Amino acid sequence: MSVLQKTLAIVLLILLGGALYGWWYTNQADSTPVRPGKTLQQADAASGVNQGTFMLAQRLAALATGPEEQRLAASAERLADHELDLAFTAALRRLEAHPPQLSAEARSVQDRLDKSQKQLESDQASVARLTAAVAQATDSQKGRLQDQLDLASSQLELDKDEIDEANEDLLQAGGNQHQRVQMMMQEHAAAQSRPAATTSSSVAPQATGRMGGLVGELREWLALHRKQEWLLYAGSQAASNAAALSTEHQRLAVRLQSLKEQTPQLAGHAQADPAAPAAPARPADSASLATTTRRIAADQQRLTLLDQRIAALNQLSGVYGNWNAVSAAKSFGILHGILSGVAVVVATLLLLLFLDRWLQRLLGRTRLDRRQVETLRSVTRVALQIVGVLIIFVIIIGVPGQLGTMIGLAGAGLTVALRDFIVAFIGWLVLMGRNGVRLGDWVEINGVSGEVVELGMFHTVLLETGNWNDTSHPTGRRVTFTNSFAVEKHYFNFSTSGQWLWDELLVLVPFDKDPNLIAEAIQKEVAAATEKSVAEAEAEWGRASASRRGKTLSAAPGVSLKPAVGGVEVSVRYITRASERFALRARLFQAAVRLLGKGIGQPPVTAPG
């Protein structure tokens, strides 16, 4: 590789690593929208209520698997919901005890709201008065009074709309925090009343899409590891919130004690003589005392609520700790299974290695041909490799869930890949039939003639010979065919039944002899030599072709003459057995030479004169 290619490969590998890391990082966002270490939700700026603890409990409840974890998740969600309800109540008590200072814009909106409320009260009184007047009026006065009542009712609706608009403007300006907290409570209650379909839907894909084997166990272990990080984070957040509330509790307790000491009437109320007459109080002092008393009572309730919230958060932290312990136990068990699977893979590899070595030694001791030993060695090695790959595949991936579908797909793939072997096996079954071939048969396959020397399950081996009309001696070459030729193509077997075949005798008659007489004499010799064979062949062919009724197949010799260089060529075709062909041809050649030597066909000699 050139320098440019190496550089490009390195850049592509870096990009690939970055893409894989990004995929892994973003894949964690399926269950929760943030990462541990970041706050899930900031507290509401106006009310001071933080719903992050409850939202985090809901997110973690979707990750619960198994009865024990689901029980702990339900407990955590219940405690977080209880703590949030207490936070809402505490926010209301704080607003009652210490109303927030309104801004100039909020004060103007508040003044407009007060005017609208006074106008609403006045219009309500008018509507009530006119309604009573209409009920008591005479018929002549009812029309006028009804018009006034309709006008007052319309004005009342306008007042209500103006009050609603003023309330919205006041909320936008930062006022009316009491109503804001109540709206948040209503939204939370409405969300809790909805059917809990998100948990089941978020857990279902994890259960249905779970993989088996080492890959599935590794993924489950990583998921448990991320869950433990979240549980540790949630527990630490609950503990830190409890600590913050404890600090607020101490500060509020000190301030409440100081407020009690600054109010003499409250401080000396317990020591006052019950029989002594109460001193008259001025109106301004009475109003101030009432306000202070309400503030002290509200702060006292806040202290109680803070104690309850601290207890709930501490319990929530303990629940997260127990949940983390359960997840840790599961993680330890899964890690044990992963190590067991790895040990099985290593043991399988070692066993296959020892088996391969043992088979090599075993085959080396056999008294087989070297090529056969090498063939068996290759077959056993491939078989061991296939078995090892299958075992390791099952251990790593696991048994497929849709086993029938997987077997069907694998069978279809193997059928396409091993089509030639399957067709060859079917062809072997055909060759084993009544019209097939046997060892020692003389056959012609795809234009190659020879004797069958091997007939295997997938291959047929011929010892090639020359043309049937020539010497038919073996050429010394072994020709191998797949048995698919018996299904897809055709073949000739010259050794079936009587093993009949047509042979040909060629004799050159010189010009000084009569070819007709020579041909007639040779035909008589051939007919006499093949008389028995002709009768047997015709009888056998007649039985084989029972459908050709009324027709006979002739096996009688045939003679033909044709001119040739140096004389006339006499061709005689005759039937013979394949095993007797060479001997019969030799006898017929001897007879032809004898006929030519006797002077048959010689023209008569005339005396001179």
Image: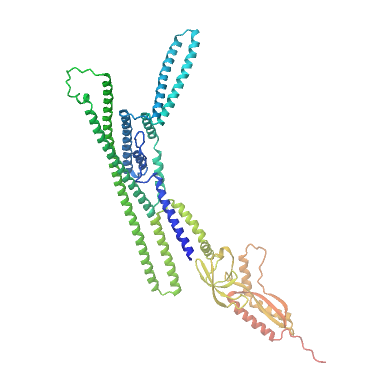
- Does 145 appear above or below 342? above
- Does 589 appear above or below 16? below
Residue 136 in percent (x, y) is at 44, 9
- Residue at 62% x, 77% y is 470
Whether residue 254 sits left or right of residue 65 in the image: it is: left
Q: Residue furthest right?
A: 609
- Does 164 appear above or below 400? above
524 vs 160, nearest the viewer: 160
Whether residue 505 sits left or right of residue 322 in the image: it is: right
523 vs 488, nearest the viewer: 488
Q: How many marks?
A: 0
- Does 10 appear above or below 37? below
Residue 360 in percent (x, y) is at 39, 70
- Residue at 31% x, 47% y is 327
Quadrant occupied by the C terminus: bottom right
| Res 502 → quadrant | bottom right
| Res 164 → quadrant | top left
- Residue at 45% x, 19% y is 156
